[in-house]
DNA sequence: TCAATTGCGTTATGCTATAACGTGTGCGAT
DNA sequence: ATCGCACACGTTATAGCATAACGCAATTGA
């Protein structure tokens, strides 16, 4: 899927996420955009829904936050799982893909006749800089 | 770690989860326990915190719900990741462990000098019975 | 021009989780 | 024995995350 032109609100939200150095919650995004006319959570959530649909933003389920995709060009997401390492100290997120993990998980799911649709792989811990 | 004797509230919450056929949210558990004297969310959350600590209950981050451990005897959780396949139609959860996935992920994290502490692997989709 | 679609703004509401306070009980150390 | 401590518990209030429902405006395409 090729990403359509973003609307004004989508662009604002996407820019905030792109400039952020850590994942942001929807309400944090809202606060950062009040000067640009944002008044209500729905304005953020509606933009996020589209950005998620286009695959340019990821949702981190374990911390209720959102992050810009680190690999927007490789359209890796269409044929593989995405995994995240999240530093609980500095917030930094490393996004990565591993086909071997994919295949292993998919094989297992197939053996259970389970039809996978969405996946969440998130590891929380401490990054190299923050580890004691 | 061996599981201590459960307190009254912990037992009530654990029993509800054990009898449930699908993951339950904390507030759903609260409703099911009102007849037993539960009045406030904290009573549920405090019991859940302990049950999670003892490893007899798992939290499903992607659906904000809790489920009893499917393998309470094999103390597999101490040395390996846990993964879940969650049916979005009937709610059934399949809990599984795969050392190859573990090792692959851990190797990658190690190569990044990332110190893993907690992991979330959840696949949503449709189980064999519910797939069209 | 008309209908359908999509984005947008607003208000209200619902769901999820924790803070902060106080009570009571069991149990080991003095 | 009683003091101190840890822990479970109960309650009220609050914080944080997400969506329902309404109406309007701009766009598109027949
Ligand atoms: Zn990505
Ligand atoms: Zn860090
Ligand atoms: Zn388990
Ligand atoms: Zn099912």
Image (cartoon, coloured by chain):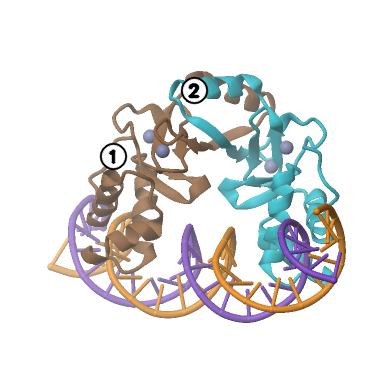
Chain colours: A cyan, B brown, C purple, D orange
Q: Residues within 10 Å of mark 2 (few under 14, many from 20)?
A: few
Same chain check for tags 1 and 2: no
Q: CA distance from mark 1 to mark 2?
A: 34 Å
Q: Position of residue C8 (x, y in %)?
A: 78, 67
| Residue identified by numbered label 2 | A110
Please give left or right for residue B54 compared with residue A113 in the image. left
Q: Nearer the viewer, mark 1 or mark 2?
A: 2
Q: Is residue A71 above or below residue D11?
A: above
Q: Residue at x 28, y 59 (%)?
A: B32
The residue closer to the viewer here, B73 or C16, is C16
| Res. A101 visible in picture | yes
Q: Position of residue B13 (x, y in %)?
A: 29, 53
The chain containing the residue under callout 2 comes to A
The chain containing the residue under callout 1 comes to B
The residue closer to the viewer here, C23 or B69, is B69
Where residue B53 sits, quadrant-wise, is: top left
Q: Quadrant of the N terminus of chain A?
A: top right
Image quarter for ligand 1: top right
Q: Residue at x 80, y 61 (%)?
A: A9
The residue closer to the viewer here, B132 or A101, is B132
Q: Is residue C25 above or below residue B95?
A: below
Mark 1 secondary-structure assignment: loop
| Residue identified by numbered label 1 | B3
Q: Position of residue A108 (x, y in %)?
A: 48, 22
The residue closer to the viewer here, A42 or B73, is A42
| Res. A57 visible in picture | no
Q: Position of residue A64 (x, y in %)?
A: 60, 52
């Amino acid at each position: 899927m090729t990403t359509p032109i973003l609307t004004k609100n989508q662009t604002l939200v996407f820019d905030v996420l792109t400039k952020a150095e850590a994942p942001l919650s929807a309400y944090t995004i809202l606060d950062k955009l009040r000067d640009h006319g944002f008044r209500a959570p729905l304005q953020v959530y509606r933009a996020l829904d589209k950005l998620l649909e286009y695959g340019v933003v990821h949702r981190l389920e374990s911390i209720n936050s959102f992050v810009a995709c680190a690999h927007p060009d490789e359209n890796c997401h269409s044929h593989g799982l995405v995994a995240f390492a999240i530093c609980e100290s500095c917030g930094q997120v490393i996004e990565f893909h591993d086909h071997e993990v994919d295949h292993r998980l998919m094989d297992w799911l197939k053996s259970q006749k389970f039809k996978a649709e969405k996946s969440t792989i998130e590891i929380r811990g401490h990054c190299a800089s923050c580890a004691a």
